[in-house]
Amino acid sequence: MSMHKTVVITGASQGIGAGLVKTFLDKGYNVVGTSRRISETTLFDRTSRLELIDGDVGDPDTAERVAQRAVEQFGSIDALVNNAGVFVTKPFLDYTIDEFRRLSATNVEGFIHFTQHAVRQMLRQRSGGSVVTITSSLTDHPITGVTASLPMITKGGLNAITKSLALEFAKDNIRVNAVSPGVVDTPLHAKNPRDYLKSLSPMGTITAVQEIVDGVVYLTEAANITGEVLHVDNGAHLGKW
């Protein structure tokens, strides 16, 4: 049985997820990372403290396999980062219900499957735990021209359930928080012009992946913080600029 804490990370193959894997490993955690084809990635040095599992987070079987592997290999689940997410912008009238179902399967159902498995295991361990979810500052303050209405139903729901679960499991010392990014320098935005992306926050900057990762790590380890939505978005949640 390992003395290290174990963190489960979804959407772990690129962008914020890959940054999370590297930083948690550097900090001495055991890491169980999942995404659709993560076993093919060459981003990570293979180590005995890293398990990579292929699967779609929207499939309930994936969360079950990941939770089992975490406990078999490392003996515990101490933290979960719900990072997997799908984001697609369109005028509201152009979205189809099938697109909504795909967004919902990954962003909401994935959250439910993984969080239920993690919390069940944390309750068995009786040593508390942490859940951190990546949401979006657009839930609070939409930006003209960034038409993300359907993704924001899902992300706004994650902010809401974060607060509900924080209260529900406070007595069990299981803390539930969210990090709410603005524009982050990830493959998601590879094709967008930089000047346009910079215009989407009052500070006029694009967030580096590591800034989001640092926010997640902080909340994972902050013993007195629960039910918090931490905006790491260069001020975009403040409103008009």
Image (cartoon, grey):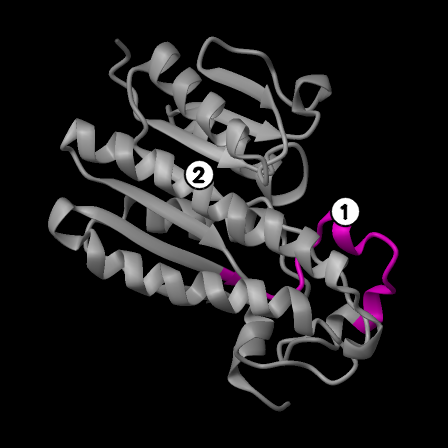
Instruction: Give SS at disc 2.
Output: helix
Q: How far across and how far down the image is residue 33, in percent?
A: 53, 27
Residue that appears at 52% across and 37% down: 20
- In the picture, the quarter occupied by the N terminus is top left
Amino acid of disc 1: Pro
Q: Is residue 70 left or right of residue 170?
A: right
Report the front residue among 131 and 46.
131
Q: How far across and how far down the image is residue 161, in percent?
A: 38, 61
Amino acid of disc 2: Phe
Q: Which label number is shown at residue 51?
A: none
- Whether residue 41 is situated above or below residue 100 in the rendered picture: above
Q: Residues within 10 Å of mark 2 (few under 14, many from 20)?
A: many
Residue that appears at 40% across and 49% down: 132
Q: Is residue 234 visible?
A: no
Magenta span covers which residues? 180-196
Q: How far across and how far down the image is residue 213, in percent?
A: 50, 46
Nearer-N-terminus badge (2/1): 2
Residue labelled with disc 1: 187
- Whether residue 147 is situated above or below residue 211 in the rendered picture: below
Residue labelled with disc 2: 114
- Whether residue 117 is situated above or below residue 220 in the rendered picture: above
